[in-house]
């Protein structure tokens, strides 16, 4: 999980560098396109092409639409915010997933979990600082929207995983996102500069290896022990911000991050305890 977080942080750094010269939708398209060849090679190596067309198409299409929206909003947010600020706001995603599970997965969420979700939202408000002079900007709202789309996509993935294989889910997500994002980005497409081919290669490798690492982490480790390590992204964000852009998060961002992370860790621990109590 620590390796996955590091790789995804480097991938997001590449996306932030690309947003300087390319529209957010095009960056989203490049993210999907660059990963597609490696995904196809991996699926072929696993011998998982068989039955790839016998899938639940409506949910695959929904996840692709959500994925394009999430990536484009996240890329737009990265253009406006530092990595640390973007990650802090995006950390609300686990709380949103828990809240949405009530509606879509019919799970029961008790008062303690609702309280933790509310505390997490307070942390987001601290980071956004809706005073007219703080982070209540298009960039901040874009990251919040990306987190919401990611949460809905995660719920859709949970439902889809009951019938479709993980390989087919990854395969069709990358194919459909590549087609959809490229179609939307085509009218304003900016020619790719040869000097940035190395960045595109880095985008491909970090995204692909990060996905393999996070999949392996959840396959081999216990979710309650693995999931909190995702918050190490904040350390990577702070370090990369300072190294590349000489910026550091302010006290509001750090305070909001502490609140959101505390609520997230509590949620993860509470769900583990709840699951253990129901299924010893």
Image (cartoon, rainbow, N blue to C red):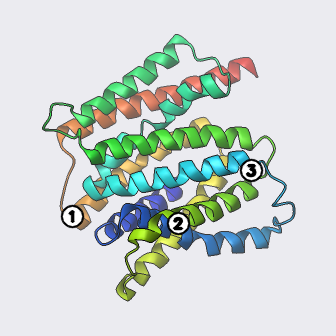
Residue 219 visible in the current orientation? no
Q: Name the N-terminal-most of marks 3 and 1.
A: 3
Give the structural element (helix, strand or loop) at label 2.
Answer: helix
Q: Residue at x 18, y 62 (%)?
A: 246
Q: Position of residue 197 (x, y in %)?
A: 43, 83
Residue 93 visible in the current orientation? yes
**Which residue is tagged 1?**
245
The residue at the far top in this view is: 111
Dot label at residue 53: none
The residue at the far front in this view is: 187
Q: Position of residue 154 (x, y in %)?
A: 60, 41
Q: Residue at x 77, y 72 (%)?
A: 44
Q: Is residue 160 above or below residue 195?
A: above
The residue at the far bottom in this view is: 194
**Which residue is tagged 2?**
183
Cα–Cα span, label 3 and label 1: 43 Å
């Amino acid at each position: 999980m620590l390796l996955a977080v590091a790789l995804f942080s480097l991938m997001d750094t590449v996306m932030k560098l690309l947003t300087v010269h390319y529209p957010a939708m095009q960056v989203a398209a490049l993210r999907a396109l660059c990963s597609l060849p490696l995904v196809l090679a991996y699926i072929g190596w696993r011998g998982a092409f068989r039955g790839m067309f016998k899938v639940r198409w409506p949910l695959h299409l929904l996840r692709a639409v959500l994925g394009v929206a999430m990536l484009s909003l996240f890329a737009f947010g990265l253009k406006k915010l530092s990595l640390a600020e973007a990650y802090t706001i995006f950390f609300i995603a686990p709380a949103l997933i828990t809240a949405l599970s009530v509606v879509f997965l019919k799970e029961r969420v008790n008062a303690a979990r609702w309280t933790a979700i509310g505390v997490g939202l307070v942390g987001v408000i601290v980071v956004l600082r809706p005073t007219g002079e703080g982070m209540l900007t298009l960039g901040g709202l874009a990251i919040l929207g990306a987190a919401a789309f990611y949460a809905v996509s995660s719920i859709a993935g949970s439902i889809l995983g009951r019938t479709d294989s993980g390989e087919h889910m990854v395969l069709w997500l990358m194919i459909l996102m590549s087609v959809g994002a490229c179609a939307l980005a085509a009218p304003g497409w900016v020619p790719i500069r040869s000097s940035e081919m190395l960045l595109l290669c880095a985008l491909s490798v970090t995204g692909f290896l990060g996905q393999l690492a996070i999949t392996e982490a959840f396959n081999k480790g216990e979710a309650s022990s693995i999931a909190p390590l995702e918050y190490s992204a904040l350390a990577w964000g702070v370090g990369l911000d300072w190294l590349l852009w000489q910026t550091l998060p302010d006290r509001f961002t750090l305070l909001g991050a502490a609140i959101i992370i505390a609520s997230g860790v509590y949620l993860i621990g509470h769900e583990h305890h709840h699951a253990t109590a129901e299924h010893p």
